[in-house]
Amino acid sequence: MEYFIELLFSGLTRGAIYALIALGYTMVYGIIGLINFAHGEIYMIGAFTAFIVSTVLSILGFPLLAIIVLAGLAAAVWSSAYGYTVEKLAYKPLRHAPRLSPLISAIGMSIFLQNYVLLAQTSDFQPFPELIPEFDFMEPYIQYLGSSDMVILVVTTVMMIGLTVLIKFTRIGKAMRATSQDRKMAMLVGINVDRVISATFIVGSALAAVGGLLIASHIGQINFFIGFIAGIKAFTAAVLGGIGSIPGAVLGGVILGLTESFATGYVSSDYEDVFAFSLLVLILIFKPSGLLGKAEIQKV
């Protein structure tokens, strides 16, 4: 039973990170129907930004809490700037092009950003500073849940609640929902759709950057390729839950994280990805719109 509980919390931690990144995929798809394959690289850039800022602040002797907060803010701001720029340069000019064109542009941006960071940094793994210390009050539960796991779960929950409030109760959130339901009608009632799309990229990029900081601190190393694997897993989570659905992205992330954790613990870590993608295939066969997604009605 203890082993089961340990795997359960490990799966929830993985799922929380997948959900944070998957929200970026599902928000962009819900607004403009684009699968932003460069989103994983935004997550990677957030991790590298946090790495650089936290290293500099550590050398300057800043306290640990200040380092975490400032590194997280810097990562969110810098990644949001990248997300905004990518949308303006690679996707906005193709807004009225066939759907295949922005998809190819997204793959191109993903490869470009990977190689950009490879040239600017290094191809080797870099040790990431341990920003989250072991808390004394977690000592009785250390065999089930580490301090970094607890921080990841708490921060992710807070971010999810904040995003829900943003979407449901703020002016920009209501504009996002209107644009998602019918972009042309939203324009007719005076909503600045371009501003809404930019805000969507900024919010999604900031969430991915926070995920990058948390998982890099948890694992303890980063390199230019971490965004590809995390991005593919998060995309799987978004499709699993129903791409375009925010609750679906969270549910998909949790299910994917638990599947990987239990498969690794009870079968073999060699088959971790096999179980994750097999689950995706089964969902696509029996419920193509995902667990919480809505099937599109084709009018004839």
Image: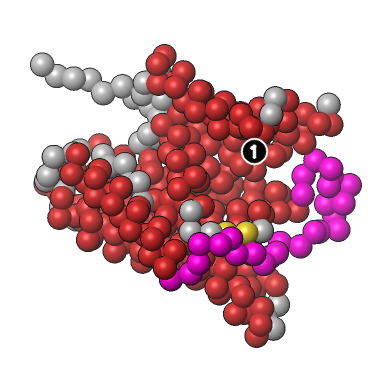
Residue situated furthest front in the rendering: 123
Residue in the foreground of this view, choosing between 104 and 86 = 104
Q: Residue 298's spot in the image, x, y percent?
A: 18, 20
For label 1, the residue is 12
Q: Kindly identify the amino acid type of the residue bearing the numbered disc 1.
A: Leu
User: Can residue 171 be seen from the camera position used here?
Assistant: no
User: Can residue 159 be seen from the camera position used here?
Assistant: yes
Residue in the foreground of this view, choosing between 46 and 292 = 46
Q: Residue at the spot x=67%, y=54% of the render?
A: 218
Answer whether residue 144 is magenta in the image. Answer: yes
Answer whether residue 135 is magenta in the image. Answer: yes
Residue situated furthest bottom in the rendering: 60
- The quadrant in which the C terminus is found is top left
291 lies left or right of 87: right
Image: magenta residue range: 120-146
Classify 186 as above or below 237. Answer: below
Q: Residue 248's spot in the image, x, y percent?
A: 45, 32
